[in-house]
Each structure stands twice: as structure tokens, then as C-alpha cells.
Image: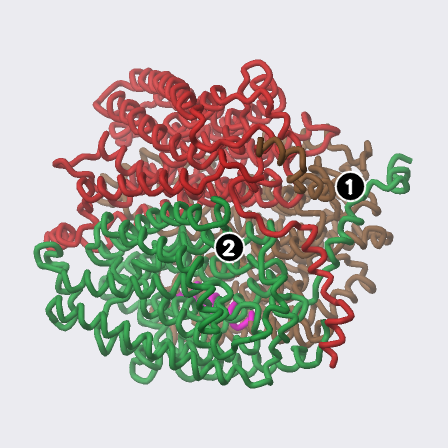
Chain colours: A red, B brown, C green
Amino acid sequence: MTNSATNLRLKLPIACIILEVIIIILFGTLVQYDDETDAKLWHKEIANGSSNYDNDFYYRYPSFQDVHVMIFIGFGFLMTFLQRYGFSSVGFNFLIAAFALQWATLMQGFVHGMHGGKIHVGIESMINADFCTGSVLISFGAVLGKTSPVQLLVMSVIEVTLFAVNEFIVLSVLGAKDAGGSMTIHTFGAYFGLMVARVLYRPNLDKSKHKNCSVYHSDLFAMIGTIYLWMFWPSFNSAVTAHGDDQHRTAMNTYYSLAACTLATYGLSAVVAHDGKLDMVHIQNAALAGGVAVGTAGEMMLTPFGSMIVGFLAGTVSVLGFKFLSPILEQKLKIQDTCGVHNLHGMPGVLGAIVGAVTAALATKDVYGDGLLPLLRNRQTPSKCGVRQAISLAVTLGIALLGGLITGFILKLPIYGAPPDTICFEDGIYWELPGEEGSQEELTAVRTPDETEKLNA
Amino acid sequence: MTNSATNLRLKLPIACIILEVIIIILFGTLVQYDDETDAKLWHKEIANGSSNYDNDFYYRYPSFQDVHVMIFIGFGFLMTFLQRYGFSSVGFNFLIAAFALQWATLMQGFVHGMHGGKIHVGIESMINADFCTGSVLISFGAVLGKTSPVQLLVMSVIEVTLFAVNEFIVLSVLGAKDAGGSMTIHTFGAYFGLMVARVLYRPNLDKSKHKNCSVYHSDLFAMIGTIYLWMFWPSFNSAVTAHGDDQHRTAMNTYYSLAACTLATYGLSAVVAHDGKLDMVHIQNAALAGGVAVGTAGEMMLTPFGSMIVGFLAGTVSVLGFKFLSPILEQKLKIQDTCGVHNLHGMPGVLGAIVGAVTAALATKDVYGDGLLPLLRNRQTPSKCGVRQAISLAVTLGIALLGGLITGFILKLPIYGAPPDTICFEDGIYWELPGEEGSQEELTAVRTPDETEKLNA
Amino acid sequence: MTNSATNLRLKLPIACIILEVIIIILFGTLVQYDDETDAKLWHKEIANGSSNYDNDFYYRYPSFQDVHVMIFIGFGFLMTFLQRYGFSSVGFNFLIAAFALQWATLMQGFVHGMHGGKIHVGIESMINADFCTGSVLISFGAVLGKTSPVQLLVMSVIEVTLFAVNEFIVLSVLGAKDAGGSMTIHTFGAYFGLMVARVLYRPNLDKSKHKNCSVYHSDLFAMIGTIYLWMFWPSFNSAVTAHGDDQHRTAMNTYYSLAACTLATYGLSAVVAHDGKLDMVHIQNAALAGGVAVGTAGEMMLTPFGSMIVGFLAGTVSVLGFKFLSPILEQKLKIQDTCGVHNLHGMPGVLGAIVGAVTAALATKDVYGDGLLPLLRNRQTPSKCGVRQAISLAVTLGIALLGGLITGFILKLPIYGAPPDTICFEDGIYWELPGEEGSQEELTAVRTPDETEKLNA
């Protein structure tokens, strides 16, 4: 499994160290503590009558940590379902997330966080950086098993940058709402990744087919990822919404959407899977679609009832996508979507964007009371808000697809140490592997007469 | 492993979809945001001088998420100890928990949460729904490996309903305290489940005996569940106690009870287990009994000292139960309690109820100061409170046993696709399984001369 | 694998029960609720105008739970990398942590928490007890696989005591800052453990060499530990810092330090590991060094820029330590450091102490504003503070090394049931093991003609 083309000895250190040095220099010149993390500025606020308990840390940090778990454990372990790609799934997830959150702080800062020439950082920028990272990890899911860590780092550099641009257009220029990122995170990450996968299409990937599946224990590891994503999705969608009822309501809407989605997923899986049995692929993925689909409308007065309908639809669409659409995507459109991100993030993301547009268009003073104005930025009418939400979806799709196209061609250059078609989905190409399991059994037969004799002597 | 009787193609979708549709309709007609999640109502409070930071979201949500982790990761992985039942343990846990939390919102709302004909929902109803779900999952532990997902859903429908009724009687009618649910959650769930297991007794279960045990890795997965339950139990017991000292004290009492319980468990396990070695079954289960046993008294002035004594006793009782009582339950009473819930939730739950009654009866103004009155609802005397706590235990046991009996007979109907005696404790009957591990070894022997040749070419 | 010398039937119960009884008696005589957990005292504060929302529970408990996860899941699973030592890694971690947190409450209380002859306990004492426990678990990493649980309990008794003494000297006598414990936790725990390992040197340990390595799945379990430690380290370092900007800033500095450290780790690992591949040992450990290295300076105005530089250095030092220093430690200094704690906690801890001293010495009113005075306890000058930080490091190293030396000799007594050289790194010596994996395969071949026949009948 040794090959000079895929040897990382020079490629990966160069990529990691150059990128980190650039980041450190940019942080040194551009990044500053914000009012709530700077000792001097915060103590001025204290002198002006604020309390330490007013620091936003206490109202955002628990959500941040839940999001952090989703990014590193959730995404990381969800992708360990492949039988011999667990090290890479968790390990490359770890690497590109650690990179992307730093790069995102800079890119999001450049585009919409500059204060007097400086990027201000605090708990909200940390959450937003993690969100942007989530988008990259979604794209990672589409190309899982077929890319080198250097390719993934290059992809992250470009994707984070475009993410920040798109986020700026959607949230700041168009004034749309998308707190949980149905559009900016899920739709963007999915279609970007699918387009990259399309450009990197491998006609001979079936040579690695026997490794592109799970084994019993790898599916259990993947369930750790699934369950953490599922549990903490209410925190994800509510992490940067307005304080008070908005945050509270968003978490609750997401909770109900996911619960309804899970029942739809189990029901549909038994219908479409082989022989009336449940399929782990559906459970691991489709049960999460309910969180994606209320990422835009979750902060609105969607009601638990509305959330459940959306979640139920999302689960249904997602299972049907895995069963019927994924094979078509692969055979007709030549998109080899390893984790099925189109079913978990793509279609549910678009559904979420549409639900968001409709819900915004239907907002009334009667339902929202004084909560209506903050929802309608710039004093637009609800119907105009709905239109802007819809335009945002179109913009997101456009930037994602075009960006993915360009990125795909850049990643196609034969300089990053990508694996050959015969050794995809295989850790051994990039990781020193421990002794084979076979030899373990030998080891575990510990009660050799020799040893026992010594012991009882 | 294919059999029309256990085929889920029709049964499971019908159950899931009918139940979810009923839930959605009921939510649509009955459920409303409460004052803290409704945009209009909350902004009215803001207009009246409240701050967004006063929203209860910030004082309950972190506890909620810890409870959520216990329900989905804790219970789910604790039950993966069986060698070939990991998919079902985590997967059915996921399904019935996602169902039960919705159903519980309705049932608990009907019984004690109606406001002007509507059920109000917010963070507290979410925690209570998760609590009720915990009770169902305890019962699941008693019948683990011997029931179909359809049976489990039917059991959940009934158990959640009776849970809400019992909770109403104990907390509202009798005015008892039980914030951490020693009675309402643990005692109820355990004895309900044991009675169901009794009615579903399988005389020929030894035909599946060789699968009713763990392997090395499955025990490690189970430890994930154990440790999460152990760590977050302080959040569980304190999640719905009164704000301030109550919540703080409850978390701390639970922390100390669990620590003492763990030392008792290790000590006792080495005494009773084979050959002076530790038994994973004890560690995975009995070390948690300390959390159960302070579920009622934890919010009182039990003191760390008292908590440790209770925890120590609970661990001792639990290990001895696993060693000596479980075999008797199975052979004499014909209760096949797969996870030993009688030892983890049953006896420690009863112990917790008794400790709660005694602690309430001994409460004095001298110790509690102004904190006494909130403890003694309806201005009862402490001794009357103690009596009401004791009555609550009796009521809980009665409803649990009777409810379990009826439910058992309903679940015995041969229409739910229950597994035959020969294929219990086996995922393959309900799940599409990935390739056998044997074939994996073949795959991992990746360095075939052929491949190496190609690579080095 | 049975041997009277390592049989735990008497040894472990005696140790557990005697220790727990002593603890309970001491708690009964010495420990009291503090102002925020005592019903009477807190209700007095309420009567004086406090709000229940001011209870420190709400501003410390989420951090506490993150720390708790690091102690029990993080440390526990990090050490499961050994192929046949998973039960002991998680299980002994569980046991000694549950003991140490109780003992630490007492020892820390004796040394610096007495109020009128009583030890007051609340959320801050709980965090501090968990911190002290972390130190013991670091030492556990150095002797992993070569010690009996009784030895570990005895080590905990002594180490916790000395930890409290050292902490008192560093924080109270010298007035140094060390919120995240670069010195008091990491440096102390590492050098204490290394010295114990030195004294317990086993010249014939290579007889167990074949078990002192990982297998594929055990490395994945270990990654659970790594990722949890990595994610929650910002909570660890900020858990007991001052409220407001300090806590917020500490969390953010740690976040950036860890991210930069991770890129350094991946880059360096590919440079030094065999054949240009990544080495799991580096990823699992060195990526965490960034958290250790900002444990002292994290609460200061280190800036994200400074944090990243520190993190980058820490990751570099750590990987190089694993590659080049660990073999020397073993061969020349006869220190068999199973988990490489010198590379993860030792050197990065010392680095963190130095960074802390420098940062303190450079503090100015211009940068800190009114936040300077709280930093400089006792109105010292910044340069004097720097000197006191440096002295603290020296004191910590001295107490750790001397304490470890004495402890090592105490643990060398042949009465604790330590494993023989031939059966180190092996669960079977202390745990009842489930059936071998080999027999599992037999079981999973479930589709025997016999069974299928019965099913289809």
C-alpha cells in the first residue's frame, strides 16, 4: 500500500504548516478581542453598570459547545460507517475542521465583521466559524474515501471563502433569515460537494467497491455520530438566533421536527429496504433531515404542529432519496456521493429554504406581536421577505454549484496525493495501521500453558 | 433469518405512520407555545420590563440537553452490551424515544398541563417528556431482545399514558416531591417492565442463550452508555427542581451519591464475581444505582454525607441483586429481565422513595429556614409529607404492576412480529446486516501482490 | 490467567470499603453546604434581595459538566487504545476518578477551604475536585497496564493529598495564576506519574510487548476520548476563572490554541512517522497539547495570535517528543511511560507555565485597563508576578518528583496484586472476560439450515 504518489511526507506538512503560518500572521495583524472578551473594554462596561453575568458567554457558550460536539463527534463519527475508513473519517474530519474554523474566522470577518479595520472575535464568531466548518464537512461527506487530506485542505480554503461570500449576500445584502443554515450551511455544503464529486468522477471506482460498505462495529460507531447530531440539532439551529423567545422557540421547533422525522424514517425504511428489514443507512442519515429542514423557519412561529409536518416530509424525502435517487445520481449524472449528502443535506436543505420563505411571507402582526419587526429587517413587508428568502436559495445554489465546479477542477490536478481507484475507502494508504485483527486473536489466546505455568509457580 | 411473521414491511410503517399522524393532528388542535416561546406573549413581557435573559431557556436548557444525552446515548448504548443486538439496542431506543417524547407531551399535557383548553409547551414540558421517555426505556431494558419494534411502540403508547396518570396522582393529588423520579420514573418503569416481561415469559428462551451475552467490543460500547448516564445524572435529578439552591443542591447530592455508589460497586463486584475478578455487568449497571436512589431526596437537605450513605447502600443492593436475586426472579418468578432493571431501577427506586419519605418527614424549619415552606406544599406538616411520599410509592407500584400486567397481555397477541425463541437477541431478524466480519478480514488483507504491483508500477 | 497474587477478592473490597467508610465519616463530621446550596442560607440571601438566577450554579455548572465529561469519557476512552486493556482503561479510570473526587474535596477543603472548622462545598469545589482528579488520571496514563486497581487507589490517596498541598502553595502562598492548571494539574500529574513509573520500572516488560499496542477498533474508541478532551478543553481552562471577560477570553484562547496545535500535529506526524503516513498515537495525543500549554496564560490577554503560536509550538514539541524523546526516556532513564504523558502533559505543561510567567510579567494597565488589578493579586508589580509564576513551576516540579518517588516505593510493596511482567496490558487478569471473538463468529453464522428450516416451517 506504499506509493510515492500518495506519500504524505512532504505534501501534508507543507500544506498544514504554510496554511497555519498564513493564518497566524493574519490573526496577528487583523484579529482583536471584542467588547466582551477584552479585559479593558469589558471592565469599562462593568464600570458603566454592567454585570459580569451579562456577558454573552453565559447565553451562547452552552449552545456553542453543543455545536462543537456536532462538528467534531457528530460529523466525524457519522462517517466512520465505512469498514476500513474510520481513522480517516474521524481524523480528516478533525484536521479540516480545525483548519476551517480558523480560516472561517478570517473570511467571515473580512466579509462582514470588520470594525475599524479589525476583525472582532468572541463567542458569536466562534459559533459562526463552526457553522461554516459544518458546511465544509458536508461537502467532505460527498467525496469521502476518494480524496487525500491535502485535497481536503485545498477544498476547505476555497469553500470557506465562498461560504463567507454567499453568507454575506444572503444575510446582509438580501437581509434573509437563516439562523440554522438550511440554505447557507446545508444547501450550500451539499451542492458544492456534489459538484466537486461530479468533477472528480471515477469511472473505475467499482474496483474499491468491496470496501465501500460497512461492517457491524463500524455501523455502531456511526450511530454515535448520528445520535449526537440528532440530540444537539436544537442547539445548532438556535445557537445564533436572537435571545429570549427566538432561541427558546427555535430549539423546541427543531426538537419536534426531528422526532417526527425519526418516525417517518423508520416507517419508510421498512417499506423500501430489502425484505421488510430496516436499513442502517436510512436510520443514520434520514432521521436527521428534520433538523436540516427547519434550519430557516425554526425561529419563526412555525408551531410544533408545523415543525412536525416539515420533519415528517423531510424524513420521507430523505429515505426515498437514498433508495431511488442516489443510484440515478451515480449512474446518470455520474455523481458518486459517498455519504448521500444529497439526501440528508441537499433536498432537506432546499425544503427548509422553501418552508422558510413561505413562513416568512405568512408572518402577521397578529401572530408575532412586537416580535414581528425584528423578524422583518429593514421594515419590509412579510411578502417581500418571502421573496428575498426565495432569492437567497437561488443565489446559494448558484454559488455552490459554480464554486464546486471550479474547486473540482482545481482538485483534479495530480499533485495532491489522491488515492488510486483501487485503494479508495482504505485507511492504510494514509495511516500507519496497527496489527491486523487476525493477529489479535492469536494474542488474546493468552492462556498458553507456558504462561499459566509461570503464573501458578 | 427471513420469516413472514417477523417481516416489518407492513407492520412497522403502519404503526409509525398512524401514530405520527395522530400525534400531528392532536398537536395541531391542542398544542400552543407557552409564554416564553410565543413571540407575541414574550414580547409583551419584555414590554412589561422583563429581560430576554430572564427567559427560562437559559436556566433549564443545559440540563435538558444533558437529560437528552442520557435518554438517547445513555440508555441506547448501555443496552448495546449484547453481542449481536447493538443495532436494535441503539436503533429501537432511538425510535421509541422519538415517539414517546411526542406522546408524553400530549399525555402529560392532558393530565396536568391544560391552559384554557390548550397544552402549553416550553423547555419544562420538553424535560418532562424526556423523563417520561426514560421510564419507557427502563421497561424496554426488561424485555430487550425479545420484542419487535411494533410491540415496543404499542408498549410505549400505554406506558406513557399510565405514567402521566401516575405522575398526576403522585405530584398533583398527593402533593409529593419526586424531582428526579425515584418513584415516578425508576420504580414505575422497572416494575411495569418486569410485569410485562413476566407475562411475555418464554420457557424456551435458552434456545437463544448463546446470544444473550456480550463480547469484548460490545461491552466497551455499553460503557459509553454507562459513563454518560453516570456523568449527567446530577443534571437529571436537578433538571426540574426549583431554581436556586434547590437545583444546585440536587446536582451536588447526586454527584456524591454516585461517587460513593461506584466504590461500593467495585468492592462488592470483586467479592461476588467469579474468581475475584470484576464483572462488567455490575460496573455497567450497579454503579448507576446511586443516581436512582437520590431521585426523590436529592433536592432536600440530605447533605453530602447522607447522599453518600444512600449511594453506598444502593450500589451494594444492586450488585447483590445481580448476583443473587436475578437468577431467582428468572427461575422462580419467571421474569426474564434482560438488563437487570430490577437491580438498577427497581430496588434502588424503592430505596429512593423510602429515603425521600424519611427525609421529608424529618424536615425542620431549623434546617431549611425559609426554604421549608416551598418544600411542604399546601402547608402540610413534615410528617404528613412523609406519609404522602410513602403513599405515593404504593400507588406507583400498584399502577405499574397492574399496567404492566394488562400491557403484557396486549403485547402477547401474535400480530406484532415478535421474534421466535430461537432468534432472540439477534439484530438480523429486523435489520439488514452488513457483510460478516469473516469477510472483512479477507478485505483487510489488502496487500495482495496484484494490488501492490499496480501501485508500484 | 488465574493467580492468587493478583486475585482481587479480598484486596479490592477492603481498599474500596475502608476508603469509602473513612470518606463518609469525614464528610459527616466536616463537610457542609455552602451559601448557595444550603436552603436556609440561600433563602436568607433571597430575602436580602438576591435572585435565584444569581446562584453560581447557572454560571459554572455547564463548565463543570464539560470538565466531568473530560474526566470520565475523555481520559477513560483515550486510554482504550490498547488492544486488550479497554475494560481496565475505562473501568479503572472510572473507579479512581470516583474515589479521587471525594478525597480531593476533603484534601482541598482541609488545605484551603475551611470556614469555621467546616469544609464548604458547592459547584466550585466540585470543579476543583474534578481538576485534582484529572491530575491523578494523568499519572495513571504513565503506569497504564502495569498496575492493579489497589495500587491505583493507594496512588490516588497520596497524589490527591500532595496535589492539594502544592495547589495551596502555588495559588495561595505564592499567589500565582493557574486557572487551567498547566502547572498544578498537568506538570504535577505528569512528573509525579513519570517518577512512579521510574520506580516501578520493569526490565522484563517486553514479555508483554505484543499486547502493548493497539488494534483498529481500539484506536477508534481512543479517538472518542481524544475528541472529547479536545472539544471541551476551552471549558476546562475557563471553568474556575473569574466571571465575565476572563471566562469568555480563556475559552476562546484555548479554542484557537487547540486548532493551531492540531495543524502542527498533522503536519509533523506525516514528517516523522513511518513512510509518510500519519500515526494515530500523535493524533490522539499531541493534538491536545495546545490545551495544556495555555492552561496558565489562557485567562490573560494572550490574544488569539499568541494562543495560536503557543498551540503550534506545543503540538510540535509533543510530536517530536513521541518520536524521539520517549524511546530515550525508556532506554536511558528507564521510564516506561505507557501513554506518553511526558509528551502530552509534561513538556506542554512546562511550556504553559513559562508562557504564563512571561505573559504575567508583560501585563500592562494599557492592555488590561481595570482588569489588571484582579490579575495582580496583592498589588504586586507584573514583573514580580512573573517571578512568582516561575517559582511556582519549580515548586510544582519538586513536589511532583519527590512525591512520585516516595509513592513509587510504597506501590512497590508486593501486597497490591500487581500483574506479573508476562501479563501486563491485559484485561483478563482483573476482569471476567466475555467469550472470545472467535466464538462470536461461530454465533453470527446464524443462518444454519436447521434454524432456517424451523423459521420457514
**What residue sits 63% from the left and 33% below the top?**
B453
Q: Is residue B255 found inside the magenta-colored segment of the image?
A: yes
Q: Secondary structure at mark 1?
A: loop
**What residue sits 57% from the left and 78% below the top?**
C150
Q: Evaluate whether residue C55 shows in this view.
A: yes
In the rendered image, residue C448, in percent from the top left (x then y), is placed at 86, 42
Quadrant location, the C terminus of chain C: top right
The type of residue carrying mark 1 is Ala
Residue denoted by label 2: B172
Along the line of sight, which residue is nearer the eye, C329 or A23?
C329
Q: Main secondary structure of the magenta part?
A: helix
Which comes before the other along the chain, label 2 or label 1? 2
Residue denoted by label 1: B418
Span shown in magenta: B249-262
Number of other residues with Cα within 10 Å of mark 2, as a class: few under 14, some 14 to 19, many 20 or more? few
The type of residue carrying mark 2 is Ser
**What residue sits 41% from the left and 65% below the top?**
C342
Q: Secondary structure at mark 2?
A: helix
> Where C300 sits versus A422, above or below?
below
Along the line of sight, which residue is nearer the eye, B124 or A200?
A200
Q: Is residue A8 found inside the magenta-colored segment of the image?
A: no
Along the line of sight, which residue is nearer the eye, C389 or C424?
C424
Please tell me in which quadrant of the rendered image residue B43 appears.
Answer: top left
Q: Are marks 2 and 1 on the same chain?
A: yes
Q: Name the residue furthest front.
A: B457
Number of other residues with Cα within 10 Å of mark 1, as a class: few under 14, some 14 to 19, many 20 or more? many
In 3D space, how far apart are the residues under numbered discs 2 and 1 (Cα atoms)?
38 Å
Q: Nearer the viewer, mark 2 or mark 1?
A: 1
Quadrant location, the N terminus of chain C: bottom right
Please tell me in which quadrant of the rendered image residue A234 appears.
Answer: top left
